[in-house]
Each structure stands twice: as structure tokens, then as C-alpha cells.
Amino acid sequence: MEKVIEIKHLNKSFGNHEVLRDVNFTVNKGEVVCLIGSSGSGKSTLLRCINLLETPTGGEIIYNGENILNDKHDVRKYRTHLGMVFQQFNLFNNHNVLKNCMVGQLKVLKRSKEAAKQNALKYLKTVGMDKYVNAKPKQLSGGQKQRVAIARALAMDPEVMLFDEPTSALDPEMVGEVLKVMRQLADEGNTMLIVTHEMEFAREVSDRIVFMDKGVIVEEGPPEQVLVNPQQERTKEFLKRTL
Ligand code: ADP
Ligand code: MG
């Protein structure tokens, strides 16, 4: 299997608070990996380290065979290969839907306006938001905003999509439409690393589940193992509380 992201002995501390401790795992091409664990276990910090919104205290992040923590590495270029979807959407409120999906392509990828527009429309269609190109974020529901945020990330043609609890800020009736889009992306063979509390979804779409607790990966494996037949006491405890 082709490794896209390989995390080796990753550590992250804030002051003397160790938030990630010797984290090791791999995301292979075309794989969907769900990261689960209690609040405060370090899931967001791990995603933020992967896209270098946080600087790891130690360890390696290998992207397509290169350690991106190496001084010589072009961080900006690396980031363009990762699509990030946040809990809070983070759309540009002053721009309409179409522009939201074009800005990064124009500014970061230096695409032409026409190319950026076509690509934006393609992915807005994928997420079912192509009818809303002229709407401003404040006119949209939470579920619609999150679908636009997903289209915006996809429009950069990233190699890996990172999701940090994309449905946690949504009203319950809107969770389904976002999960449906993510399921579709998973079925299309996209490489995805997803932090989620949606266990049913995780069980259905994941090739692998990674369970984190207190900054450590406690257990990982296929969903039928980790969710149905967990080996570790801490995993069993967590699942008892969430299922
Ligand atoms: P999760 O996403 O699993 O809920 P986080 O990665 O957000 O967990 O947080 C893990 C721990 O790191 C928490 O104890 C949190 O308070 C701490 N933490 C996260 N970001 C910072 C920061 N910027 N400064 C200090 N502590 C932080
Ligand atoms: Mg988090």
C-alpha cells in the first residue's frame, strides 16, 4: 500500500503539558481513517500538527516519503496537498459561496479565474450546493455551510482530506446531509482522516479506526475489531460511554 502520511514518534507539549505522546500511525492512499476518543485526548492537536497549524515538539511527519518537519521543506506547498474541514466551517462571511470556493485556488494555486470557477462549480455540485453560488454564508443553514466548506477544500484538489468533527456544531437534523457527502467522498476513493463522534458513520466508512486517549494511541484496527471487539480496557470504557 502507498503511504501518504506517516506519523512517527510524534510529540506535542504546551508548556509542560504533554498533549501528544509518541504517536505513530499511517494513512495510506485511498484509505479512510477515523480518529475517535474523548474530548481533550489530543485529536484536534494531532490534526493541527499534521497540517502544521501547530509545530510538533518532536517526531516526524512523512508526506510521500519526505519529512516535512525538515527545515528545507516548503511548508506552504505541503499545506496545499491537505484539505481541512473544521467544526466551525470557517467560511469567509463577506464572500458568496462561489467566491469562497475560488479564493484559495486563485491566491494559493494561482489558477486562472475561469479554471477556479469551473473547479469550484464541479465540487459545489458534488456536495449539492451548486444552486447557491450567489448566497452569502449567513443565508445558509449549518449543514449547507459545512457542505460549502467541504467543496472549498476539495476545490484545491488536495491529496488528503482532514476533517475535525465536521458535524459537531450542527443541529441534529443537519448531520445526515453532511455525513452523506462524506460517505460519497469515501466511496469515490478519497484519502480521508476524520475526527468524529459519529460511531455508526465511522463503523460504516472507515478502513481503520484509531482510538486515542490522553495523547496516546491506545488501539487501532478495522472497525469490526476496534468498535465491536476492542482489545484494550480503555477502548471498551470509551465505547460503553458513547454507544
Ligand atoms: P480533542 O480534540 O481530542 O478534544 P485537543 O487536541 O483539542 O483535544 O486538546 C488536547 C489537550 O491539549 C487539552 O488538554 C487542551 O486543553 C490542550 N490544548 C490544546 N490546544 C492548546 C493550546 N493552544 N495551548 C494549550 N493547551 C492546549
Ligand atoms: Mg477537538
Image (cartoon, rainbow, N blue to C red):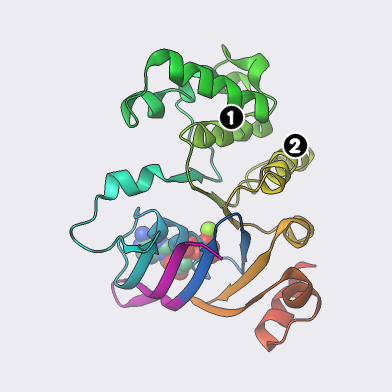
Dot placed on the residue nearer the N-terminal end, 2 or 1: 1
Asked if labels 1 and 2 touch by Cβ distance under 8 angstroms, the answer is no
The residue beneath circle 1 is 148
Q: Is residue 94 visible?
A: no
Query: Is 181 located above or below residue 135 in the figure?
Result: below
Q: Quadrant of residue 171?
A: top right
Instruction: Tell me if mark 1 has few (under 14), some (14-19) or many (20+) residues whose alpha carbon lies within 10 angstroms of its own.
Output: many
From the viewer's perspective, tell me whether residue 17 is left or right of residue 29. left
- Is ligand 2 less than 8 Å from the beta carbon at label 1? no
Q: Quadrant of residue 112?
A: top left
Residue 25 location (% of width, % of height): 50, 72
What type is the residue that disc 1 sits on?
Val
Q: Is residue 13 magenta?
A: yes
Q: Residue at x 40, y 14 (%)?
A: 113
What type is the residue that disc 2 sits on?
Glu
Can you tell which mark lies on residue 174? none
Q: Quadrant of residue 114?
A: top left
Query: Is most of the magenta stretch helix, strand or loop?
Result: strand
Residue 32 location (% of width, % of height): 63, 57
Q: Residue at x 44, y 62 (%)?
A: 45
Q: Residue at x 46, y 58 (%)?
A: 47
Which of the two residues, 163 or 16, is positioned nearer the viewer here? 163
Residue stretch rendered in magenta on the structure: 1-23
Query: Is 67 located above or below residue 159 in the figure?
Result: below
From the viewer's perspective, tell me whether residue 223 is left or right of residue 45. right
Query: Is 147 located above or below residue 168 in the figure?
Result: above
From the viewer's perspective, tell me whether residue 15 is left or right of residue 208. left
Give the alpha-carbon distance from disc 2 to disc 1, as whole Å: 12 Å
